[in-house]
Image (cartoon, rainbow, N blue to C red):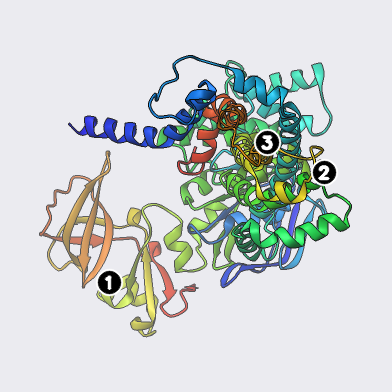
């Protein structure tokens, strides 16, 4: 009885989470005539016309490439700086460590909308408006507090003695970081990297504000701009959303085990 | 190999005093033990030697050289930890090779060194295993090997036996002593276990609140404790400490007091030195038996003497039961006398 309840509960949660995506998937393969009609819920015939349309009628490949480039570079920068800072905060005992961590948490609470106007001006002044580099800079900056905080937790979970052993065994602080601490924090790196990548991939507000042309436009903004003045091409929007979601799903599946290890690290002492 | 000198080292964490103007010299090749209750900051002394923690005051010298500003990787000491602290992402061979790789050794020369240490410690069958697949005893052997492999100027050992179960503890203890006798590397060893300290040390420093209460050879520590703290800390079971008033009827004690006020004196008696037997007539010390503790070849007796607890050996052939009255005897020279207020031993 209890197991039946658990199963029902899980099914309900899955349905709740997956229903919008299932709806998008259905919409993306429905013939245009059935798009705004209900019933039928299921399409009478499968069509890939919408998928073809986003790549033919819109520069969707370019959008994907932009998104991929921005997310990848921003993630790499956030991981690089975040793991160095997290390591320093967790193991080097700098003065003012608690204050620094508190500041990091406070910063990560800032809503993006609060920083849009100043960033618009700063990025403009730096000559980076409508460039991928500008978006990379803003995204990595925005993701950094999260990355620092998470990586500090992962490094803290590595026992102090292991770091001390590495130092005594002949490593400099940087050597101990590279040869011992970083390999032990791989699950944390993967989990943090995935979170940052998903944030960058989905980000809309900055992308809309800072990029004005196809040079730096990313997928979320591109899909939003599918809509014309007179009509909303629901089929193409759905197809675009499905294509944009697929890489994230693939990433999550590929790293699922690592992410689970990472997100539960520190809960049980290894 | 090198001597290690602490010169007026001071260290505190907030209010906790780890070292208070602590001075001592560990001789080249000596096995030196810091013995103190848990949580008195003994590990921090090792961290100061290793360069992980700077001292707040004073000078640390290794081989006569002032270590101020010298980072851990250039001090050439090796550490062994209670928690083993093996590198979980490397196999046994990778763990053993780690310190030598850091010095640029590679290839066949590195392999030969790993093999040499692995054979010496009986690890040659385990070289491909990860630390997670090893038992506690095997892990500590790997940790010893990792320390041993680069022939450091000193070993620092931080309670290396505390996580092992009793039988392994004796085995690894012998291993540590054997390694020291074979290589004579200066060793600073930290423990709260006096038995371990006695078995291993050339000299022991008993620590209390950041100060050395007494620093001596194990036998001297046992025979001539500086105060009642050391007296109770060294030797198992711990020494009985009784107010002299409880023993006032014992002729030898009163003779020794020679007119001093018994209320200001504490008498120490090791349980080994006190015999409990059936009360005779007119015997001087009568105690009521509370408990009997068989210890194999003999039994311990816990008795009550004028409201004070005393542990003694059951005399051979004596049969006593809880609740009965017993006579306690001891040789006059077995008693230690301490000042009740300061704890200092009185000659």
Observer able to see residue B29: no
Classify mark 1: helix, strand or loop.
loop
Residue visible at 33% across and 35% down in the picture: A12
Q: Chain of mark 3?
A: A
Q: Residues within 10 Å of mark 1 (few under 14, many from 20)?
A: some
Q: Chain of mark 2?
A: A
**Is residue B115 shown above or below A209?**
above
Observer able to see residue B89: yes
**How far apart are the two marked residues, 2 and 1, measured between alpha carbons?**
92 Å
What is the x, y in percent for residue A111? 61, 59
**Is residue A235 shown above or below A196?**
above
Q: Which residue is mark 3?
A: A219
Q: Which residue is mark 1?
A: B250
What is the x, y in percent for residue B252? 33, 71
Q: Chain of mark 1?
A: B
Residue visible at 70% across and 38% down in the picture: B184
């Amino acid at each position: 009885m209890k197991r039946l309840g658990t199963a029902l509960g899980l099914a309900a949660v899955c349905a709740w989470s997956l229903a919008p995506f299932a709806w998008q998937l259905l919409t993306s393969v429905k013939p245009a005539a059935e798009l705004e009609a209900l019933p039928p819920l299921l399409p009478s015939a499968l069509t890939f016309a919408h998928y073809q349309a986003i790549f033919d009628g819109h520069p969707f490949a370019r959008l994907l490439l932009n998104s991929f480039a921005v997310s990848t570079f921003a993630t790499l920068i956030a991981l690089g700086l975040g793991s160095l800072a997290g390591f320093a905060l967790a193991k080097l005992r700098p003065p003012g460590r608690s204050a620094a961590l508190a500041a990091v948490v406070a910063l990560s609470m800032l809503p993006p909308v609060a920083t849009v106007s100043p960033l618009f001006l700063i990025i403009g002044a730096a000559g980076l408006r409508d460039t991928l580099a500008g978006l990379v800079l803003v995204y990595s900056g925005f993701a950094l507090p999260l990355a620092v905080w998470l990586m500090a937790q992962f490094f803290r979970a590595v026992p102090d003695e292991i770091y001390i052993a590495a130092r005594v065994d002949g490593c400099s602080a940087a050597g101990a970081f590279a040869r011992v601490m970083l390999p032990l924090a791989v699950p944390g790196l993967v989990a943090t990297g995935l979170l940052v990548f998903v944030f960058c991939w989905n980000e809309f507000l900055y992308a809309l504000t800072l990029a004005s042309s196809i040079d730096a436009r990313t997928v979320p903004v591109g899909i939003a701009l599918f809509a014309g003045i007179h009509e909303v091409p629901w089929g193409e929007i759905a197809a675009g959303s499905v294509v944009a979601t697929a890489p994230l799903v693939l990433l999550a599946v590929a790293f699922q085990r690592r992410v689970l290890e990472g997100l539960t690290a520190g809960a049980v002492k290894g | 190999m090198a001597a290690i000198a602490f010169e007026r080292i001071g260290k505190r964490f907030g209010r906790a005093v780890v070292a208070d103007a602590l001075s001592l010299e560990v001789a080249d090749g000596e096995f030196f033990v810091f013995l103190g209750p848990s949580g008195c900051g003994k590990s921090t002394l090792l961290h100061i030697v290793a360069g992980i923690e700077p001292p707040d005051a004073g000078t640390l010298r290794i081989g006569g050289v002032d270590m101020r500003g010298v980072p851990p990787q250039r001090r050439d000491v090796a550490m062994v930890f209670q928690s083993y602290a093996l590198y979980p992402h490397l196999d046994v061979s990778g763990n053993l090779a780690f310190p030598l790789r850091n010095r640029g050794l590679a290839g066949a020369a590195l392999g030969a060194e790993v093999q040499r240490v692995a054979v010496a410690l009986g690890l040659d069958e385990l070289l491909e295993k990860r630390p997670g697949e090893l038992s506690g005893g095997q892990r500590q052997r790997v940790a010893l090997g990792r320390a041993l492999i680069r022939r450091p100027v000193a070993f620092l050992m931080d309670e290396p036996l505390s996580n092992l179960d009793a039988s392994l503890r004796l085995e690894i203890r012998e291993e540590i002593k054997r390694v020291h006798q074979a290589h004579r590397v200066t060793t600073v060893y930290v423990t709260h276990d006096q038995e371990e300290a006695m078995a291993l040390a050339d000299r022991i420093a008993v620590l209390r609140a950041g100060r050395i209460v007494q620093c001596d050879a194990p036998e001297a520590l046992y025979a001539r404790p500086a105060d009642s703290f050391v007296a109770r800390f060294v030797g198992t079971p711990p020494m009985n400490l009784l107010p002299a008033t409880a023993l006032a009827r014992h002729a030898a004690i009163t003779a020794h007091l020679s007119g001093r006020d018994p209320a200001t004196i504490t008498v120490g008696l090791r349980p080994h030195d006190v015999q409990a037997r059936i009360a005779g007539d007119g015997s001087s010390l009568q105690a009521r038996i509370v408990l009997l503790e068989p210890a194999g070849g003999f039994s311990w007796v816990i008795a009550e003497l004028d409201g004070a607890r005393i542990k003694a050996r059951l005399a051979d052939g004596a049969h006593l039961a809880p609740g009965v009255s017993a006579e306690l005897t001891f040789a006059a020279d077995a008693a230690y006398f301490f000042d009740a207020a300061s704890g200092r031993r009185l000659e």
